[in-house]
């Protein structure tokens, strides 16, 4: 078990789950988060509530609000403290947002990751470094796979694609969005620190990562935002593909246990797709129906004919490579349980602060 764990983006969905998990295991956990999610997405993206929750719930957690773009600030932290595990979750996470702020997006996602990798190489070269990348590094290449239109979802037409997209999918000559490009830059640099410098770097290309601690907003965190809009009576827009676009959803807990498995037996520079897999896949129409049933009310939805630029039509992560390398790991939270937990969590939050 790592002794000293650094978590970047520690007030976010995955970061906060990592903080709690490693704190429970008896590690000393150091978190970096400057609440930049609020800058990206406004008040609904504010993560301070989650920081306060963590501070109350943990035993050995220290938070600093360093910006990962601030090389000097990072250098100071890494000089003061040696780390055994770095879980890098801080990011500008939305592809729609990136087109409004392309330079900030690149600075946070690409340069911020480079800053952390280099600080690790200089000061904690033996550490395991887990980088949360994204399936957007594949751009819209997954849309080239032949699909069948079913009643409520698109699905892969050929038997060989059934288990989903694996890591051999190409990452160039495809439409990424600026976000996909900044994450792909970070993904490649992270691979290089593993392959070239032989550091213990692992790259996890996320499908839809989800869980109760998401400060869900329209531009990022689709299930969390869908639950919120259904519970509060807010409007929700479905963009294109007849609402039959498919995402695979993984609970933040299962992402963190994958990182833990990698940390116990790291494979330098390895890339893994990390999502909920076929079992946790759902289309927009199916998700709405499930959430409406749990919430006991209808969502006010409208349909916009045009899909989001480069949006995946059907994306299911093939988990076979990670499962072959780490056979002890598996998905433990089925989709229905994830949704039930999210509805209960957001209901409780609404009771505590009815205006929010
Ligand atoms: N949530 C998803 O569906 C999803 C899917 C694929 C990949 N990912 C990736 O997983 C990682 C974690 O995503 P998440 O859903 O937890 O995001 P999140 O927005 O909930 O958390 C990210 C945290 O990083 C912080 N942050 C942003 N910029 C920062 C900066 N410059 N310095 C310090 N802190 C900063 C934010 O305030 C936020 O709390 C990201 O790299 C994201 O790209 C997420």
Image (cartoon, helix red, strand yellow):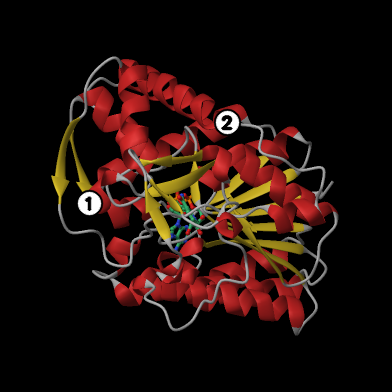
Q: Which residue is mark 2?
A: 334
Choose between 84 and 253: the one closer to the eye.
253
Residue 61 higher or lower than 233, as above or below: below
For residue 40, the mark is: none
* Cβ atoms at labels 1 and 2 below 8 Å apart: no
282 to the left or right of 161: left
* Residue displayed at 48% across by 82% down: 172
Does residue 69 appear anywhere in the picture?
Answer: no
- The secondary structure type at the circle numbered 1 is strand
Choose between 207 and 312: the one closer to the eye.
312
* Residue displayed at 66% across by 33% down: 332
Q: Which residue is mark 1?
A: 239
- The secondary structure type at the circle numbered 2 is loop
- Which callout, 1 or 2, points at the residue further toward the start of the chain? 1
Residue 329 higher or lower than 73, as above or below: above
Expressed as whole percent of the image width and height from the top left, the position of residue 163 reads: 60, 52
């Amino acid at each position: 078990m790592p002794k000293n764990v650094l978590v970047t983006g520690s007030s976010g969905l995955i970061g906060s789950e990592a903080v709690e998990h490693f704190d429970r295991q008896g590690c000393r956990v150091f978190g970096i988060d400057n609440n930049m999610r609020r800058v990206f997405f406004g008040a609904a993206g504010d993560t301070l509530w989650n920081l306060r929750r963590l501070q109350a719930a943990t035993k050995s957690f220290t938070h600093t609000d360093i910006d990962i773009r601030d090389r000097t600030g990072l250098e100071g932290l890494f000089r003061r403290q040696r780390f055994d595990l770095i879980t890098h979750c801080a990011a500008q996470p939305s592809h729609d947002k990136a087109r409004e702020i392309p330079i900030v997006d690149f600075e946070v996602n690409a340069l911020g990751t480079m800053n952390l990798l280099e600080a690790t190489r200089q000061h904690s070269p033996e550490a395991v470094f887990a980088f949360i990348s994204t399936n957007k590094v594949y751009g819209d290449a997954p849309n080239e796979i032949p699909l069948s239109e079913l009643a409520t979802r698109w699905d892969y037409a050929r038997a060989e694609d059934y288990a989903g997209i694996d890591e051999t999918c190409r990452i160039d000559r495809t439409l990424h969005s600026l976000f996909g490009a900044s994450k792909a830059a970070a993904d490649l640099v992270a691979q290089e620190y593993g392959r070239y410098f032989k550091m213990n770097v692992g790259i996890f290309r996320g499908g839809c990562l989800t869980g109760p601690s998401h400060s869900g907003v329209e531009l990022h965190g689709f299930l969390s935002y869908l639950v919120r809009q259904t519970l509060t009576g807010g409007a929700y827009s479905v963009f294109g593909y007849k609402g039959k676009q498919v995402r695979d959803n993984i609970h933040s807990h299962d992402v963190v246990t994958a990182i833990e498995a990698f940390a116990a037996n790291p494979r330098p520079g390895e890339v893994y797709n990390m999502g909920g897999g076929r079992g946790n896949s759902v289309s927009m129409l199916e998700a709405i129906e499930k959430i409406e049933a749990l919430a006991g009310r209808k969502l006010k939805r409208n349909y916009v004919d045009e899909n989001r630029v480069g949006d995946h039509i059907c994306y299911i992560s093939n988990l076979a490579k990670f499962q072959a390398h780490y056979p002890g790991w598996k998905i433990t939270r089925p989709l229905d349980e994830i949704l039930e937990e999210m509805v209960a969590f957001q209901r409780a939050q609404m009771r505590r602060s009815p205006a929010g």
